[in-house]
């Protein structure tokens, strides 16, 4: 194979593996793929109309990203995150949001403030009509847009990596009664801070929102554990 043909082959393989990654991420975000779900290499290849090689490449990339686990002789599974990993992720996310707020506030334009206000209004209106999945995607888009508005591509890339991993646990907080209302109020505090263009006030509001989200996730997780059916005792 010539050098140019080989390069084209590599590029095509990378593009196809990216397609598989995007499809699996979509499944995680929509709830079609839950924690512990086994991924079928052949089924994915047939459904997407590709060979199995890019699927295997996608699995390796997702493993490096912390989204799946590869078990020898068993297969590939959507990862579960320990309580410690969840706490660490939220801690990193809080720092990234704080940085985003500090960068964005001094440079945000009136038009951008109005854009974010419209997104929050849409988010609030979705709570009763669109269901958890619709709310989930709008919430992701709102926060992603704020980080994008900073103009810092490195920050945006790191932020998206963290958020992709948080998709494995973020739904915990949405199952808690009153969590949406609390989140809406925090979004409005962030908007008010951005409107003042005060960097420290905005940074603090964005960090506090993530920290409050973590507390809601912890409370929801504990509630789920309390109502989970008892596991049978292991034989001696």
Image (tube, rainbow, N blue to C red):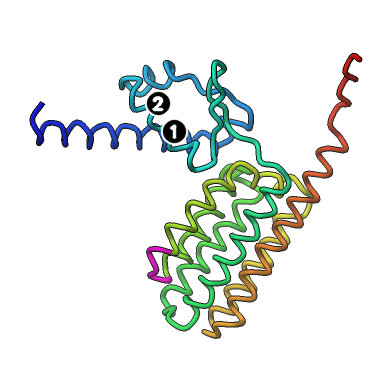
Label 1: how many Cα within 10 Å (few below 14, some 14–19, many 20+) = some
Circle number at residue 56:
2
Q: Position of residue 209 (x, y in %)?
A: 66, 65
Is mark 2 in CB contact (under 8 Å) with mark 1? yes
User: Image point 51% across, 60% down: which residue?
Assistant: 142
User: Image point 62% across, 67% down: which residue?
Assistant: 187
> With 14 as the anchor, is 149 left or right in this view?
right
User: Image point 61% across, 70% down: which residue?
Assistant: 206
Mark 1 element type: helix
Residue 109's place in the image compared with 53, above or below, is below
Q: Which residues are magenta?
A: 150-154
Q: Would residue 68 be counted in the magenta stretch?
A: no
Q: Position of residue 18 (x, y in %)?
A: 35, 37
User: Image point 63% across, 43% down: which residue?
Assistant: 132
Q: Position of residue 101 (x, y in %)?
A: 54, 74
Tell me the CA gap for discs 2 and 1: 6 Å
Q: Nearer the viewer, residue 39 or 28?
A: 39
Q: Which residue is the site of mark 1?
A: 60
Q: Quadrant of the C terminus?
A: top right
């Amino acid at each position: 194979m010539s050098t140019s043909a080989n390069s084209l082959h590599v590029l095509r393989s990378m593009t196809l593996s990216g397609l598989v990654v995007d499809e699996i991420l979509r499944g995680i975000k929509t709830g079609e793929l839950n924690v512990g779900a086994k991924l079928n290499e052949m089924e994915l290849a047939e459904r997407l109309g590709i060979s199995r090689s890019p699927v295997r490449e996608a699995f390796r990339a997702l493993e490096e990203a912390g989204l799946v686990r590869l078990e020898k002789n068993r297969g590939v599974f959507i990862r579960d995150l320990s309580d410690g990993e969840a706490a660490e992720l939220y801690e990193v996310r809080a720092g990234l949001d704080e940085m985003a707020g500090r960068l964005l506030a001094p440079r945000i334009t009136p038009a951008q403030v109005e854009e974010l206000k419209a997104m929050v209004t849409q988010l609030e209106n979705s709570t009763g009509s669109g269901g958890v999945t619709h709310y989930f995607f709008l919430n992701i888009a709102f926060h992603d847009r704020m980080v994008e508005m900073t103009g810092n591509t490195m920050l945006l890339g790191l932020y998206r990596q963290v958020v992709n991993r948080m998709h494995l646990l973020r739904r915990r907080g949405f199952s808690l009664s009153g969590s949406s209302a609390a989140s809406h109020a925090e979004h409005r505090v962030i908007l008010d801070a951005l409107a003042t263009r005060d960097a420290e006030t905005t940074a603090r509001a964005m960090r506090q929102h993530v920290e409050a989200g973590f507390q809601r996730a912890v409370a929801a997780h504990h509630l789920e554990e309390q109502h989970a059916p008892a596991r049978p005792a292991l034989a001696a």
